[in-house]
Image (cartoon, coloured by chain):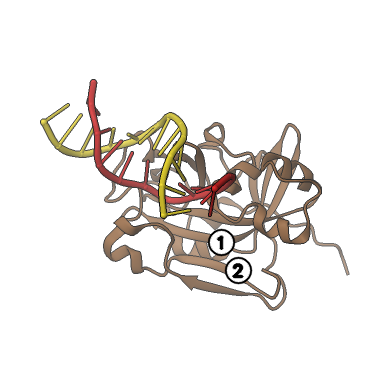
Chain colours: A brown, B yellow, C red
Amino acid sequence: MQTMIPSKLPRTFYARPVLTVARELVGKTLVHVTEAGVLRAVITETEAYDGTCDKGCHAYPYKCTDRTRILFGEAGHAYIYLIYGMYHCFNIVTNEEGYPAGVLIRAVVPIGDGLEQMAALRKQPTPPTEKQLLRLMNGPGKLCQGMSLTKAENGFDLCGDRLYVEDTQLPEGSQILTTPRINIDYAEEAKAFLWRFVLCNKTI
DNA sequence: CTGGGGATCGAG
DNA sequence: TCGATCCCCAGG
């Protein structure tokens, strides 16, 4: 059997409805090529945000500001913003231009040669144990620390060579759990939307 | 549980 | 211009 090399997700993947993209991103592999090495991690948790109908979204209702402008742009670009003065959140723009929506990547599990660097970025001991690996980037702020994502990467094209997602397969026997989103108490009726997707299997 | 920390954006 | 609010995390 031939060795499969995962391909980079094309723009057509991102240029679809945000719920479809959010669900299908679970199990794919986020890659950040940095000066110090290639950082790689499997996406285990996502949330959809839709500025046309969702009070949880920065761009609701079609609200275009300096910050949210990127959400109105071409699909497949990174939307990264600072939160609580100290952490960043990483999103991927979806849908067609002019339609403000994106997927928040909430959690990943690190893999590959960049493990030590990702642990160091998180100021965790190296090498990490199996259990520490699962906790290393299990939140949006921690994910940005470990994957070295800051406002410097805001607007990056995920169809470029620096930051992209590989089309990897879900692990055998895994399922995707659908739940309400986290920490959006202000979002009124949108709080109940089942727009969070979590990878579930025996080990995660 | 709480404090830290700074950008953001709408109100005034 | 000001200040309430924010898709969070580490430490106690």
Query: Across the whole image, how many numbered discs are drawn on residues?
Result: 2
Q: Residue at x 72, y 56 (%)?
A: A133
Disc 2 and disc 1: Cα gap in Å? 6 Å
Question: Residue A190, relative to residue A152: is it above or below?
Answer: below
Residue A84 appears anywhere in the view: no
Q: Residue at x 37, y 68 (%)?
A: A193
Residue A142 appears anywhere in the view: yes
Q: Chain of mark 1?
A: A
Question: Residue A107, relative to residue A34: is it above or below?
Answer: below
Disc marking residue A195:
none
Q: Amino acid at mark 2?
A: Leu
**Do dots 2 and 1 share one subunit?**
yes
User: Mark 1 = which residue?
Assistant: A45
Q: Amino acid at mark 1?
A: Glu
Mark 2 and 1 residues: CB-CB less than 8 Å, in contact? yes
Q: Chain of mark 2?
A: A
